[in-house]
Image: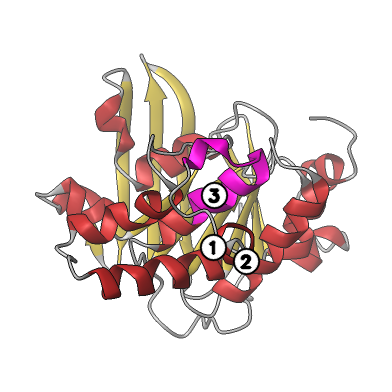
């Protein structure tokens, strides 16, 4: 496996990585999903992950956030370090997850108003002053390119928004955690192309504030967004490199080119 050393705008390979993955092994009921993965993710980069279904992409995101604790059949070996600390060393898993915002393929809103969806996490952190909550809600909805569309109906149920708006609300809620990492798992599956492009513009802007790990089944989306891209295949991290290098065939494994060109997957 090749691990490209080029990093994106605002990121530096000379700085300690924010994520260090070493010999990561994931299995479900003894059946391997990811085997021997080792790579780094740098601060302020968009790190793309592409590959066919059942290649271990989502399993990697679950391991990052210790979501294996919700799945008794999921076994994780090796190590993942965030800011130099192994994720399993966190006694309070909720403190770890508070640093990691997650956006799933389908919008997962709380059965609350638009306002309360975004204010939920700040309230858990102890924010009580309405003026402060108002500021957080407006700021996060603005960063998610949603404020202008919902500012006059903040008291309406989030579930009444369109699918694309609900997905942006999910991003706003993730941002309200003030995370260091934002994990996106095929966020555009249920979103129309126009909204997808709007969210992509949001992600480009967010790169300056946090680190993004983007799992996508759309290889051209990875090309538009990712500074570096990893190709996962059947539980193996085949190759990692600067995204343009992968798309310009400056690769070490022909399987990468085959997948990018649509010959399989």
Which quarter of the picture shows residue 251? bottom right
Identify the residue at horizontal 41%, vertical 65% (top origin). Answer: 137
Q: Which residue is mark 2?
A: 148
Q: Is residue 237 visible?
A: yes
Q: Give the label on residue 151, or none.
A: 1
> Quick check: marks 2 and 1 in contact, CB under 8 Å?
yes
| Residue 146 coordinates in the image, percent (x, y) | 60, 61
Q: Which residue is mark 3?
A: 184
CA gap, disc 2 to disc 1?
6 Å
* Dot 3 crowding, Cα within 10 Å, few <14, some 14–19, many 20+: many
Q: Is residue 7 visible?
A: no
Q: Nearer the viewer, residue 149 or 75?
A: 149
Q: Earlier in the sequence, mark 3 or mark 2?
A: 2
| Residue 253 coordinates in the image, percent (x, y) | 76, 49
Residue stretch rendered in magenta on the structure: 157-171
Label 1 or label 3, whichever lies nearer to me, is 1
Q: Is residue 46 magenta?
A: no
CA gap, disc 1 to disc 3?
25 Å
Identify the residue at horizontal 46%, vertical 23% (top origin). Answer: 32
């Amino acid at each position: 496996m090749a691990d490209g050393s080029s990093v994106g705008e605002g990121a530096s390979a000379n700085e300690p990585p924010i994520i260090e993955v070493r010999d990561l092994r994931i299995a479900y009921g003894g059946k391997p999903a990811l085997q021997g993965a080792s790579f780094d993710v740098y601060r302020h980069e968009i790190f793309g992950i592409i590959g066919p279904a059942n290649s271990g992409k989502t399993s990697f995101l679950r391991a990052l956030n210790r979501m294996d604790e919700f799945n008794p059949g999921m076994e994780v070996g090796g190590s993942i370090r965030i800011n130099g600390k192994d994720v399993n060393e966190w006694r309070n898993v909720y403190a770890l997850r508070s640093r990691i915002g997650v956006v799933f393929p389908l919008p997962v809103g709380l059965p609350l108003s638009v306002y309360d969806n975004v204010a939920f996490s700040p309230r858990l952190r102890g924010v009580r002053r309405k003026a402060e909550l108002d500021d957080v809600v407006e700021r996060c909805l603005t960063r998610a390119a949603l404020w202008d569309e919902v500012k006059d109906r903040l008291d309406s149920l989030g579930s009444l928004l369109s699918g694309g708006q609900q997905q942006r609300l999910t991003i706003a809620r993730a941002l309200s955690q003030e995370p260091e990492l934002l994990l996106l798992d095929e966020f555009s599956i249920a979103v129309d192309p126009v909204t997808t492009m709007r969210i992509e513009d949001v992600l480009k802007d967010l790169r300056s504030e946090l680190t993004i790990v983007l799992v996508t089944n759309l290889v051209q989306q990875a090309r538009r967004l990712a500074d570096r891209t990893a190709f996962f295949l059947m539980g193996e991290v085949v190759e990692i490199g600067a995204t343009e290098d992968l798309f310009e065939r400056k690769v070490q494994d022909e399987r990468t080119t085959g997948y990018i060109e649509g010959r399989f997957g």
